[in-house]
Amino acid sequence: MAKLPVITAMGGVNAAGRTSGHHSYRRMIFDSLSQSQAQLTAQSLAALTNRLKQDNNQWLGLGEPVNLEEFIAQQRSPLLEATLIRKLEHNLFDPAQLPINQRTRVQSAFDNPLQIKLRTKDLPSPLPSGWDVQPGNDEKHVNVTLTDHLEVLLPTTRAADVNSAYQLPSGFDPAALYASRNHPRGLQLTVFAASDAINSLGIDWDAIRQYIAPDQISVYAGSGMGQLDYNGYGGMLQARLLGKKVTSKQLPLGYAEMPADFVNAYLLGNLGTTGTNIAACATFLYNLRQGIRDIQAGTHRLVIVGNSEAPLMPEVFEGFSTMGALADDNSLRKIDGLSADELPDFRRACRPFGYNAGFTLAESAQFLVLMDDELALELGANILGAVNDVFINADGFKKSIASPGLGNYLSVAKAASATRNIIGDKGLRERSYVQAHGTGTLQNRQTESHILNHIAQTFGIESWPVTAVKAYVGHSLATSAGDQMVSTLGFWADGILPGITTIDGIADDVYDSHLDFLLQHRQMSSTDIDATIINSKGFGGNNASASILAPHLTLAMLEKRHGKDALKKYQAVNESVREQSAEYDAAMCAGHNRTIYHFDNNVLGSEAIEMTDKRITIKNIKPEVSLNVKNLYEDMCD
């Protein structure tokens, strides 16, 4: 039987806050929280955004001694306003003054040739045609006579068409949490998010390394678009055009798989399998599939899966706007019947399955730690849920590369069937729900609703609950299914399904005869839902759907496989793990940074290994790497 991939930790950050401890999920359902939960969620945001810190048992709010409860009460409204979707802030760029270069032709206004004065060191080489260069009044300058026109780029600015985005909470600066050394923003988010996941495990990583062989760990993480800001590919491509120099870091740090490389090299010291899949907006689930296949096959015992995307740059906004994919200001005004001088409702820019204008860009990084079921029990790891399976299908022949096709019908149907295998027909009909891709575009609301509705009808589901968390955290492209996963695991902690509260109702062209789109939060017992289907769609025909199992169901499955005595032993070991996880969360809520970053630390060379034809031993790591590789084609060999 295949090993069960158990979710033992999660970490990250998005527009709703820090992932571990379910804080970002609770920000989405903040109005439905108990008073104590709301207090702790606001405290987490205050600590994350550098407003709050505990120092020697003294709480400091904005640098001054404060009473904790009074300070959180005063700061609650500003903290909530500084999260989720909002008007673009100037910490990344000023949307009212986007720098551009206006191409123009300069000619003399008179019959005489155009003459200009240049510094000698600014002369282009080779000289353009029609340039006559003569010495100037000093050695540092020359006089240039132009017999033809001059093509020039004039620096100017323009206002952005889109002024809303799901930015990280105002005041959160991942670069300040470790020696970031001009890392692209996506890699800064990677370091924080992966650290959050590893710390929230409640198990020391060095202890794990001494428990399982190095080649039984894998890391699959990346970014769909690579690192596009100036410290990555963006700077490499722009530098010469801007009269600057390309740095030695811009190209290597721009690679799409660099988040996995950073986790391996600077957080874990991982020697196991590594890489990333790239599948546009379905990338997270593609990586998740890669990870669970390792565990199911028994080749790996622990897998870290994640994505980091930091696309809030003028060039990316313009690219998606030109495609007609983003909800721009004028389109929002048109939907709400506003005049040209009225501000659109930026807080409701993303409207999945309602009357909408396009999706809203977001930045996010999300990571999961998965273990095989036996390892999770042995280590006493927290069990947040399990991954039943992930299904991926392409769209077939296409006319437009960006338009949807048939692949998502296949992936959702397979995920529904796989879910039914575990919880039965009645369970699928009555004890499951869907985390929809739900981008907020006209095309998505029509096509995805038809897919979900058709499959619900086919499987005999009368009213399948559907939610879409992009209404809260936006579209983070490659990481978007990670944001959906965070919400899924959060529900099983608190029992509240987030409603699609940015819409007033379902659009007339949405298919909903067998669907129940949640327009308000729905509170129930977390054990009322046994499984969730997470759906994800990406440009180019990348479709992925995952079947995720509830923690209470996961524990029941583990008891059936390993027995009651094994579960009792697990629960005893898990007590200390839970305590360590809670201690980490409390430290983060007190403003104590735990970001992991080991630069030039314990770097091993060839002297650190001993090798025979049967095994490899690595210095300071107890488990050996076996070279007894199974022959998969034994029946074909002599």
Image (cartoon, rainbow, N blue to C red):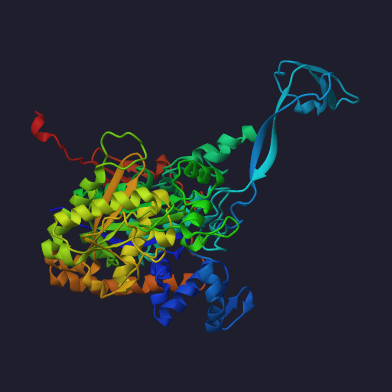
- For the point 58% across and 71% down, the residue is 51
Q: Nearer the viewer, residue 78 or 638?
A: 78
For residue 613, say whether it is visible.
yes
Q: Give the x, y percent position of residue 474.
A: 43, 57
Q: Is residue 367 above or below residue 591?
A: above
Q: Nearer the viewer, residue 336 or 109?
A: 336
Q: Is residue 310 above or below residue 338?
A: above
Left or right of 270, for residue 213: left
Check the image and name the residue furthest to the right: 137
Left or right of 133, for residue 450: left
- For the point 77% across and 27% down, the residue is 121
Q: Quadrant of the C terminus?
A: top left
Q: Give the x, y percent position of residue 412.
A: 22, 51
- For the point 62% across and 52% down, the residue is 94
For residue 270, say whether it is visible.
no
Residue 229 position by quadrant = top right
Residue 243 position by quadrant = top right
Q: Give the x, y percent position of residue 162.
A: 53, 51
Q: Is residue 489 above or below residue 60?
A: above
